[in-house]
């Protein structure tokens, strides 16, 4: 069974601070996505990474896929209150099957 | 707009009743997924369709759960004889065209079983 472990599960920081969220597995994924979810809404896709070692930037967010395609990280620079939400990583195996989600990281950015 | 509509957004029911959720993707995409999510947790896979064929169903689902996608467009998820443990957000998603598994979710259907 493929599992994705996210850490930390909860993160409460002040506006302007930097943070990193980790997503780890013992399995290899053909692709990995990061989503952000607000209360009462569905997850919204932020980014997809497919190549080992790949780095993608989305404004203040930097996403990295591990060289072995087993892990990923999300780094946020100068966090804003608007970044508050549940961040989810999700991976798909090489057989092209279903997307498996991590348990999420609940981020709270206080003004 | 993710191109996925779900109905109803909220459903409150008594234990033992049947409930049905509907998912309408904006167009007929090959793959359509159902997930279940409890508060503060990640979405948990339930089942997915390619066109009208149900290709995989989670072993976590009991026989009380059934999903259909009769014409390869909209889909329904029915829960029979609901239990309090069924209370959750039920999410439907369409897969993107990039073949990397990207999902575009609806806003979800929140079920509360009293």
Image (cartoon, coloured by chain):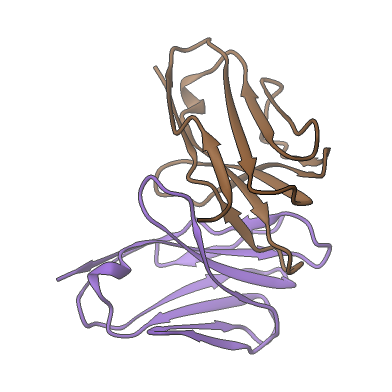
Image point (71%, 46%), residue name:
B32
Chain shown brown: that is: B
Residue sitting nearer the eye, A7 or B73: B73
Q: Quadrant of residue B23?
A: top right
Residue sitting nearer the eye, B6 or A11: B6
x and y percentages locating residue A78 in the rendered image: 27, 84
Q: On screen, B77 above or below A81?
A: above
x and y percentages locating residue A29 in the rendered image: 72, 71
x and y percentages locating residue B105 in the rendered image: 56, 51
Q: On screen, B30 above or below A73?
A: above
Q: Is residue A111 left or right of residue B7?
A: left
Image point (55%, 42%), residue name:
B5
Q: On screen, A55 above or below B42?
A: below
Q: On screen, A17 above or below B8?
A: below
Residue sitting nearer the eye, A57 or B56: A57
Q: Quadrant of residue B113?
A: top left
Image point (30%, 83%), residue name:
A18
Q: Quadrant of residue B81?
A: top right
Give the colour in which the image draws chain A: purple
Residue sitting nearer the eye, B57 or A60: A60
Q: Is residue B8 left or right of residue B56?
A: left
Label total for image: 0
């Amino acid at each position: 069974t493929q599992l994705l472990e996210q850490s930390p599960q909860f993160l409460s920081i002040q506006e302007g601070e930097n943070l990193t969220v980790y997503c780890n597995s013992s399995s290899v994924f053909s692709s990995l996505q990061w989503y952000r979810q607000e209360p009462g809404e569905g997850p919204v896709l932020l980014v997809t990474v497919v190549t080992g070692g790949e780095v993608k930037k989305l404004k203040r967010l930097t996403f990295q896929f591990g060289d072995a395609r087993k892990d990923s990280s999300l780094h946020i620079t100068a966090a804003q209150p608007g970044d508050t939400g549940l961040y989810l990583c999700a991976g798909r195996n090489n057989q092209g099957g279903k997307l498996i989600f991590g348990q999420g990281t609940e981020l709270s950015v206080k003004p | 707009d993710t191109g996925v509509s779900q109905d109803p957004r909220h459903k409150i029911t008594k234990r033992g009743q049947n409930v049905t959720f509907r998912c309408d993707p904006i167009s007929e995409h090959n793959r359509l997924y159902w997930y279940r999510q409890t508060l503060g947790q990640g979405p948990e896979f339930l089942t997915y369709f390619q066109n009208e064929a149900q290709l995989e169903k989670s072993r976590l689902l009991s026989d009380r759960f059934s999903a259909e996608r009769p014409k390869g467009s909209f889909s329904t998820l029915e829960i029979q004889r609901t239990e309090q443990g069924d209370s959750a957000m039920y999410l439907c998603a369409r897969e993107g065209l990039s073949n990397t598994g990207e999902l575009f979710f609806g806003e979800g259907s929140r079920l509360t079983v009293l």
